[in-house]
Amino acid sequence: MAGQENKYDQRYTESDCYWGTKPSVLCDRLLKVLAGLELKPSDLSMIDLGCGEGRNTIYMARRGITVTGLDLSPAGLQKTKLFAERAGVEIKTIEASLFDCVFERDYDIVFSTGTVHYIPEDSRERCFEYFKSKTARHGFHAISTLVEKPFIEKAPDSEEQVTLFESGELMSYYKDWEIIYTIETIFDCNSGGVPHRHAVNRLIARKP
Ligand SMILES: C[S@@+](CC[C@H](N)C(=O)[O-])C[C@H]1O[C@@H](n2cnc3c(N)ncnc32)[C@H](O)[C@@H]1O
């Protein structure tokens, strides 16, 4: 487990599909952006940071993108591989922490849903700069993160390591990139079997 505690191992082992099988809305949003720019998915590589059980990894691989899923949880990665096999797609996986991972190559797309809020606040600038540096020229980041709102209660399955982003914080890491899309909204979640709500910031940015 790359030396860090992760409760998801147990969650992924005990549940069929903790996050469900439906991909994040950010997948189709990004595919639409790529189509609008006439970029062929089969020409593109992507890393999915904190891929979990691979719902987005597999969805994007099925569209033809060469996808690598990175997560701290071996159980999550095992399921990602199993679900990819069942879907008939090839993917790669990396067991590592996103705070100190070293990418062996650059990617056209850095994708991440529900994970960057695990990065401690004082490491965020450095981590985002690293992910940006490992992105190909004119490549994309598609990121979603949970955002702090005084009127939204803490999720029942939230973890101590999580520090929610401030409103507008995610965009602040992309001052030197083109922001293609950004939205802050509230969604219903049933993770852990207890209905609750999250505020989320989704962003798609392009490297100059
Ligand atoms: C909320 S889940 C999201 C999973 C997936 N992206 C999805 O949307 O279905 C967060 C994921 O981040 C992973 N994670 C947490 N801290 C991490 C770290 N430091 N490095 C890599 N992955 C981490 C967890 O194991 C978990 O799979």
Image (tube, rainbow, N blue to C red):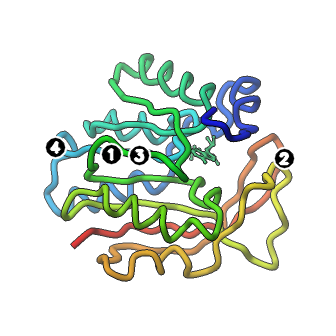
Question: Disc 3 versus disc 4: distance between alpha carbons?
Answer: 23 Å
- Residue beneath disc 1: 46
**Residue kind at label 3, given as amino acid type:** Val
Q: Nearer the viewer, mark 1 or mark 2?
A: 1
In the rendering, which numbered label is found on residue 102? 3
Sequence-first disc among 4 and 2: 4
Quarter assignment of residue 5: top right
Find out whether the residues at labels 4 and 2 contact each other: C-beta distance under 8 Å: no
**Residue kind at label 2, given as amino acid type:** Val
Question: Disc 1 versus disc 2: distance between alpha carbons?
Answer: 32 Å
Sequence-first disc among 1 and 2: 1
Q: Residue at x 43, y 30 (%)?
A: 93
- Residue beneath disc 2: 194
In the rendering, which numbered label is found on residue 161? none
Quarter assignment of residue 92: top left
186 horizontally vs 31: left or right: right
Q: Secondary structure at mark 2?
A: loop
Sequence-first disc among 3 and 4: 4
Question: Disc 4 versus disc 2: distance between alpha carbons?
Answer: 40 Å
Sequence-first disc among 3 and 1: 1
Q: Residue at x 31, y 55 (%)?
A: 134
Q: Secondary structure at mark 3?
A: loop
Q: Secondary structure at mark 1?
A: strand
Q: Nearer the viewer, mark 3 or mark 4?
A: 3
- Residue beneath disc 4: 43
Q: Residues within 10 Å of mark 4 (few under 14, many from 20)?
A: few
Q: Residues within 10 Å of mark 1 (few under 14, many from 20)?
A: many
**Residue kind at label 1, given as amino acid type:** Met
Q: Residues within 10 Å of mark 3 (few under 14, many from 20)?
A: few
Q: Position of residue 58 (x, y in %)?
A: 42, 34
Count numbered badges in the picture: 4
